[in-house]
Image: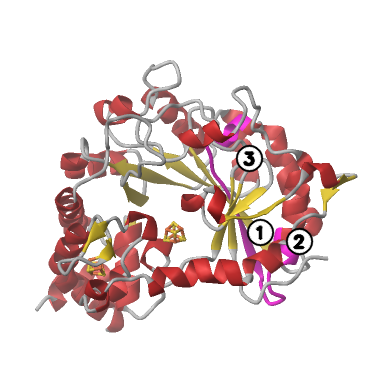
């Protein structure tokens, strides 16, 4: 029996580690392959799958009625459909009475066909498609491992999802060569039918960078990008298109907690499990010093491994300290910042700049975040007022001061 955690926690799982059929230039995860033997298969075993499924469910607090399984890569479809059929079977086997289980699955979409789409529909998976926009934008940085274009394959996968009416959202990386394409990219994502959109700013780190080329955005590019998209969105899409960062900002203004870990006060509630059973404090910190546990294959007993206690690790002092470090290392400039509740200094991994009074730990994108908050806040204020007076947020122009 695993320890029951005192709080709900989330686990991101990499069933094939960093293995991918694409070779995206800015990917922060592909270099993780270097940790393994050159020909390692990087496939999660069924023993690890069953152990983690059982413990992940058993270790959630007694009152937890909903558990979400999150699959990422690399490219998770490379683990094969049968693996995910088994995963769903195990989720049902270990679910507590009355508990609902959902799955989200981040993919480049290139291998999705009718069989995958039918499975996703049948099991109510939410699919996140990684797509950067137009042909030129997408293909220039997201080639396959042989250097060929990949957008047509991603679009083929997306068509299969639509054919089977599978719920999907999109994730687009914003880097220094496509940041000027804000309006075009937003329009293309809408044209593809995406109504839930996430933009991820690219901030590279020397330990993950794959070539001499640094794809990081400048803070100014990030600010302009967000403001340009915001302009389009506020014109015609409020309440219709959900842009994660915008909705998060509005939610915080309304007094809700941040739904994005980047902009929460604390981290630590989202660990990551690698294909080989190694467990890390966070997906963005999969380095040896942040490894918090390991399911050791040598201890396999029938099809379960007993060498790890997920619940105990989730509420361990070490994991708590990882989470509170986000707050304790926040520089004074952020603590005094008017926009701190909306930003919270962003992800600690991106805090590579220094403040005006030379304190380390300022977010590389700070100037861009400030530009966006300064510009958008009157509109968010009006949207909140519209909602509070019983209207839709789209009625915000009436409440603009
Ligand atoms: S906008 Fe800048 S100063 Fe303000 S909290 Fe964010 S990173 Fe810190
Ligand atoms: S380290 Fe970054 S990615 Fe990880 S939980 Fe914290 S904010 Fe999120």
Q: Residue at x 62, y 22 (%)?
A: 39
Tag nearer the camera, 3 or 2: 3
The image position of residue 90, as x and y in percent, is 77, 50
Which badge, 3 or 2, is on the more N-terminal residue? 3
What residue would you read off at disc 1?
101
Q: Is residue 205 above or below residue 113?
A: below
Looking at the image, can residue 149 be seen?
A: yes
Determine the image quadrant of residue 42. Answer: top right
Looking at the image, can residue 91 be seen?
A: no
Q: Is the N terminus in the top left, top right, bottom left or bottom right quadrant?
A: bottom right
Q: Residue at x 56, y 28 (%)?
A: 113
Residue 95: mark: 2
2 and 1 marks in contact (CB < 8 Å): yes
Q: Residue at x 35, y 35 (%)?
A: 26
Image side of residue 73 versus residue 366, left or right = right
Residue range (magenta): 56-78
Secondary element at tag 3: loop
The residue at label 2 has a CB less than 8 Å from ligand 2: no
Give whichever of 77, 276 is nearer the camera: 276
Image side of residue 263 versus residue 399, left or right = right
Determine the image quadrant of residue 188. Answer: top left
Q: Is the C terminus in the top left, top right, bottom left or bottom right quadrant?
A: bottom left
Residue 15: mark: 3
The image position of residue 31, as x and y in percent, is 47, 34
Image side of residue 121 versus residue 355, left or right = right
Tag nearer the camera, 3 or 1: 3
Label 3 and label 1: CA atoms lie apart by 18 Å
The image position of residue 95, as x and y in percent, is 76, 61
The residue at label 1 has a CB less than 8 Å from ligand 2: no
Image side of residue 84 versus residue 114, left or right = right
Which badge, 2 or 1, is on the more N-terminal residue? 2
């Amino acid at each position: 029996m695993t320890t029951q955690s005192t709080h709900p926690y989330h686990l991101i799982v990499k069933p094939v580690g960093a293995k991918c059929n694409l070779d995206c230039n800015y990917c922060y995860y592909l270099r993780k392959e270097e940790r393994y033997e050159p020909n390692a298969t990087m496939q999660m075993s069924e023993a690890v799958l069953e152990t983690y499924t059982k413990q992940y469910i058993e270790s959630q607090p007694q009152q937890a009625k909903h558990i979400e399984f999150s699959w990422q890569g690399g490219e998770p479809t490379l683990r094969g459909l049968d693996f995910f059929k088994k995963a769903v079977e195990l989720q049902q086997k270990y679910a507590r009475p009355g508990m609902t289980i959902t799955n989200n699955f981040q993919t480049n979409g290139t291998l999705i066909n009718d069989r995958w789409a039918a499975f996703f529909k049948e099991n109510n998976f939410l699919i996140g498609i990684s797509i950067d926009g137009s042909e030129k934008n997408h293909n220039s940085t997201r080639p396959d491992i042989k250097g060929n274009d990949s957008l047509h394959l991603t679009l083929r996968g997306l068509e299969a999802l639509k054919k089977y009416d599978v719920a999907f959202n999109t994730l687009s990386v914003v880097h220094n060569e496509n940041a000027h394409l804000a309006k075009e990219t937003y329009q293309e994502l809408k044209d593809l039918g995406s109504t839930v959109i996430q933009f991820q700013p690219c901030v590279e780190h020397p330990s993950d960078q794959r070539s001499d080329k640094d794809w990081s955005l400048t803070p100014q590019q990030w600010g302009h990008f967000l403001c340009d998209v915001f302009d389009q969105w506020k014109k015609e899409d409020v309440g219709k298109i959900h842009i994660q960062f915008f909705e998060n900002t509005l939610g915080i203004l309304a007094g809700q907690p941040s739904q994005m870990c980047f902009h929460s006060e604390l981290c630590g509630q989202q660990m990551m499990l690698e294909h080989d059973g190694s467990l890390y404090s966070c997906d963005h910190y999969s380095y040896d010093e942040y490894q918090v546990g390991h399911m050791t294959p040598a201890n396999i007993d029938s099809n379960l491994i007993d060498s790890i206690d997920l619940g105990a690790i989730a509420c361990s002092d070490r994991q708590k300290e990882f989470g509170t470090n986000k707050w304790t290392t926040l520089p004074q400039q952020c603590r005094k910042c008017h926009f701190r509740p909306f930003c919270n200094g962003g992800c600690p991994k991106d805090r590579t700049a220094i403040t005006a009074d030379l304190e380390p730990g300022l977010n590389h994108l700070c100037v861009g975040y400030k530009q966006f908050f300064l510009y958008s806040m009157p509109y968010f204020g009006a949207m909140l007022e519209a909602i509070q007076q019983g209207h839709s947020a789209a009625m915000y122009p009436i409440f603009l001061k």
